[in-house]
Structures are given as structure tokens and as C-alpha cells.
Image (cartoon, grey):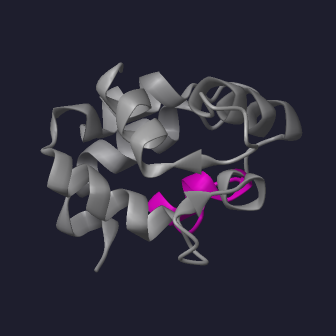
């Protein structure tokens, strides 16, 4: 299963290019640009499972840092500040990771 099974390569390129500069990444803007916010819950869940590299049921901080690289191999890692901000925005229960429900809520709010 690949990200491009759910999202158009052109949308992915646009979203990656929009946050090339360090500290320019915004999760909500990225989800909107890449077209994820318009997808069905099943499609969003499939993308979540790709992002959950260790299959723990959560996207943890180390997975968030490599978030963009799941969409495009040559993309940059998120900075420490971007990773922290992403985690704060998505982690509604404060457990230090983003679960499926939290990810879905963040995507839908985009």
C-alpha cells in the first residue's frame, strides 16, 4: 500500500513544495493541500496506517519527524519545533503520541 494509492502525486508535490523551508510546515495546511481532508474515513485510516511505521496504533514523535518522507522520499525531516507543534496540535489526550481518532480529527479540521 502506497500513499499514491490514496493521494494524487501532483497534490503531494504541491504540499511538499509548500513546506520546503525549515519551520514552514503546518499539519492542517499540508492535509488540505495534499487533499487528505477530502478523503473518506477509510482512506484517511489507510494513510494513518502507512504513517504508523512501527504499527503501534500511534504516530509517535520519531515517526512525526519523518512525516514528510512518507509522502516523498526526498522530502526533508521536520524540525524539532515543527515536530513538537504537530504533536501538540494532534495529541488531544496528552499521551505524547497521535492515535487514529486524534489523527482523523486533525485531518477533518483542516
Q: Residue furthest left?
A: 40
**Foreground: 48 or 4?**
48
Question: In the shown orientation, is residue 89 left or right of residue 50?
Answer: right
From the viewer's perspective, tell me whether residue 43 is left or right of residue 77.
Answer: left
Q: Is residue 91 left or right of residue 103?
A: right
Rendered residue at 59%/64% (across/down): 74
On the question of residue 98 being in view, the answer is yes
Q: Position of residue 97 (x, y in %)?
A: 68, 48
Q: Residue at x 28, y 64 (%)?
A: 46
Q: Is residue 48 magenta?
A: no
Viewer-proximal residue, 54 or 16?
A: 54
Q: In the picture, residue 106 is in which quadrant?
A: top left
Q: Residue furthest right?
A: 80
For the point 16% across and 42% down, the residue is 39
From this viewpoint, is residue 22 visible?
Answer: no
**Residue 36 position in % (x across, y down):** 27, 40
Picture residue at 75% right of the left edge, 32% below the top? 82
Residue sitting nearer the eye, 57 or 35: 57
Q: Bounds of the magenta span? A: 65-76
Q: Position of residue 19 (x, y in %)?
A: 58, 33
In the rendered view of the protein, which quadrant contains the C terminus? top left
Residue 60 screen position, x and y as percent = 69, 56
Residue 71 shown in magenta:
yes
Quadrant for residue 33, please give it: top left
The foreground one among 22 and 31 is 31
Q: Is residue 57 left or right of residue 48?
A: right
The quadrant in which the N terminus is found is bottom left
Above/below status of 19 relative to 99? above
Amino acid at each position: 500500500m502506497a500513499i499514491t494509492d490514496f493521494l494524487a502525486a501532483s497534490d503531494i508535490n504541491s504540499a511538499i513544495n509548500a513546506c520546503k523551508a525549515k519551520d514552514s510546515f503546518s499539519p492542517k495546511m499540508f492535509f488540505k493541500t495534499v487533499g487528505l481532508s477530502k478523503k473518506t474515513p477509510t482512506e484517511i485510516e489507510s494513510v494513518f496506517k502507512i504513517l504508523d511505521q512501527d504499527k503501534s496504533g500511534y504516530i509517535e514523535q520519531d515517526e512525526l519527524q519523518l512525516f514528510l518522507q512518507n509522502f516523498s522520499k526526498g522530502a526533508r525531516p521536520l524540525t524539532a519545533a515543527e515536530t513538537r507543534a504537530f504533536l501538540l496540535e494532534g495529541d488531544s489526550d496528552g499521551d505524547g503520541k497521535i492515535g487514529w481518532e486524534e489523527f482523523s480529527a486533525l485531518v477533518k479540521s483542516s
